[in-house]
Image: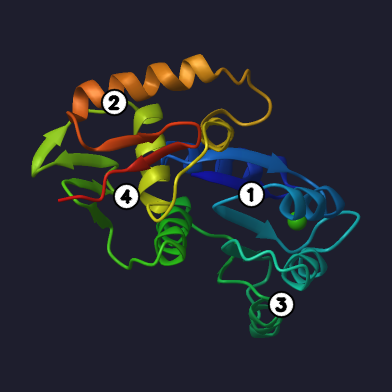
Amino acid sequence: MRALAVEDDPRISGDLRRALSAAGFRVETCADGQEAWFLGDTEDYDLIVLDLGLPRLDGLSVLKRWRANGRAMPVLVLTARGTWQERVEGIEAGADDYLPKPFRMEELVARARALVRRAAGGGSARVEVARLAIDTNRMAVWVAGVPVDVTALEYRLLSYLVHHRDRVVAPVELLEHLYGDDEARETNALEAVIARLRRKLGPGVIATRRGFGYHLDAAP
Ligand code: CA
């Protein structure tokens, strides 16, 4: 899962990065509204945490521009004062949820996970696709009811496939969500992770559609 944290306070931004990374997100940060607008308009995120008070372009305007342009990613808004006017404005501008400052990182992570689950069409922390099950709160994986030990990177890959289970995911898209733009993108590295996961999960979980990419095998 790829997340963007838009926050101009470096301390909160660092906390957001750490908390969301620990929760299994691959996190990018951004400290001004203009840059945030550009990133949200041109990149695909599974979640955006958006502070409202930002330099260059305020958060509400950023959110309105995204929605006006048809960008539908889940957005969790951080309001400075927690006044009801700000909450109403945020929700009318297209926020999916909001959290008044100061907040506990545990609550932010719980709400972030709930938003990603809701966007994927499921309300429960446990998501099942045929023989595979993942728990997005505990970052745990089972195949046919048997727990499987996976690394954080392997979990992120599986979680992405689960949340996009209705389609084939191209290798370049998986790489982007796993490693981001700022790290080397190596198709070989992705193939190595897939091969490792297949050894752990057994056959018939991750399927390859030759020339297109990967998908979860939905056959029970
Ligand atoms: Ca701010």
**Nearest-to-viewer mark from 1 and 4:** 1
Where ligand 1 lies, by quadrant? bottom right
Q: CA distance from mark 1 to mark 4?
A: 20 Å
Q: Residue at x 43, y 31 (%)?
A: 210
Badge 4 density bin: few <14, some 14–19, many ≥20, Cα 10 Å: many
Query: Along the horizontal axis of the image, is 85 left or right of 190?
Result: right
**Kind of element beneath mark 4:** loop
**Three-letter amino acid code at disc 2?**
Leu
Residue hosting label 3? 93
Badge number at residue 44: 1
Query: Along the horizontal axis of the image, is 13 left or right of 138?
Result: right
Residue hosting label 4? 136
Q: CA distance from mark 1 to mark 2?
A: 25 Å
**Kind of element beneath mark 1:** loop
Residue that protrudes farthest toward the right in the picture: 56
Q: Residue at x 81, y 51 (%)?
A: 38
Query: Along the horizontal axis of the image, is 19 left or right of 172?
Result: left
Task: Name the residue nearer the viewer: 158 or 34.
Answer: 158
**Three-letter amino acid code at disc 3?**
Ala
124 to 88, vertically: above or below: above
- Measured as percent of width and height from the top left, residue 67 is found at 72, 70
**Three-letter amino acid code at disc 1?**
Asp
Q: Residue at x 45, y 58 (%)?
A: 116
User: Which of the two discs, 1 and 4, labels the residue nearer the N terminus?
Assistant: 1
**Nearest-to-viewer mark from 3 and 2:** 2
34 to 90, vertically: above or below: above
Judge: label 2 CB < 8 Å from ligand 1.
no
Residue hosting label 2? 197
